[in-house]
Image (cartoon, helix red, strand yellow):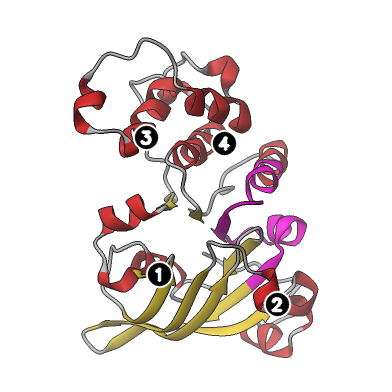
Amino acid sequence: MTASFRGEDYLEVGGLTVDFDGFKAVDGVDLTLLQGRLHFLIGPNGAGKTTLVDALTGLVNGTGRASFRGHDLLGMKAHEIVRLGIGRTFQTATVFDQLSVVQNLDIAAGLHRKAWTRMRARRRVPEVVEEALETIGLAALAERPAGILAHGQKQWLEVGMLLVQDAKVMFLDETVAGMSSEEREQTGALLQRIVADRTIVVIEHDMEFMRSYADIVTVMHGGTVLAEGSVAEIQADPQVQEVYLGTATEVSVDA
């Protein structure tokens, strides 16, 4: 990729390695994650996808280089990385079930408020929270407890929590797992709405979803990058076909 395609907030990864007592879960990975593109990260179990994201978000130690806004993420703690503008979701939604949708968003928005302002009662819903409610399509459910939301709606709420934190890099782990066909389409549309000024990386095993929405696909295998390119390029890649023991259009890989 040439520099002309890179927005201000692209994330550059070079030689990233994660070693667990001699086992290299991630082995010398080079990646450029571009602003404004939906970047999908796929591969079978044990490929190193989640460990890669764990290293970039401060949950495991890695060596190499991961540059964002002039900072090396590999030398930072998890909370520092969040404050820098990098967020993630997990396979299981982590929302406060007993609190309302709007309360979940308001708590997430408090990340960038001073401690003493977080203690004050809120007289009105902050504008950034109202905007997120509209963006994720949950404005009508703002006062509902998050625990009663449908599975897909909880995932959208998590995306909204990243939006109110002003996350410029989002790592989304199996966002559409367990969703209905309609929910998957709504999720894809949501990601397309918010990606223009963000870097979004989706760890995914749903190949239909990937084919419909991915701009760039990175295939990992054995802790390394096996292939990278457009959906068409990945599906036609002989190495990808060989690893998955069939044509790429037939394969269903696990995240």
Relative to 240, 121 lies left or right: left
* Residue at disc 3, secondary structure: helix
Q: Nearer the viewer, mark 2 or mark 3?
A: 3
Reading the image, the residue beneath label 1 is: 70
Contact between labelled residues 3 and 4, with CB atoms less than 8 Å apart: no
Contact between labelled residues 2 and 4, with CB atoms less than 8 Å apart: no
Mark toward the start of the polypeptide (2 vs 3): 3
What residue appears at the point 49 percent right and 75 percent down from the top-left corner?
Answer: 12
Relative to 115, 73 lies left or right: right
Q: Nearer the viewer, residue 242 or 110?
A: 110
Q: Looking at numbered disc 1 in the image, what kind of residue is underneath it?
A: Gly
* Residue at disc 2, secondary structure: strand
Q: Which residues are magenta?
A: 189-217
Reading the image, the residue beneath label 4 is: 152
Q: Nearer the viewer, mark 3 or mark 1?
A: 1
Residue 155, horizontal then vertical, whole percent: 51, 39
Reading the image, the residue beneath label 3 is: 108
In what quadrant of the picture does the N terminus appear? Answer: bottom right
Mark toward the start of the polypeptide (3 vs 1): 1
The mark total stands at 4
Q: Nearer the viewer, mark 4 or mark 1?
A: 1
Q: Looking at numbered disc 4 in the image, what kind of residue is underneath it?
A: Gly
Contact between labelled residues 1 and 4, with CB atoms less than 8 Å apart: no
Contact between labelled residues 1 and 3, with CB atoms less than 8 Å apart: no
Reading the image, the residue beneath label 2 is: 229
What residue appears at the point 68 percent right and 43 percent down from the top-left corner?
Answer: 193
- Measure the C-alpha gap from mark 4 to mark 2: 28 Å
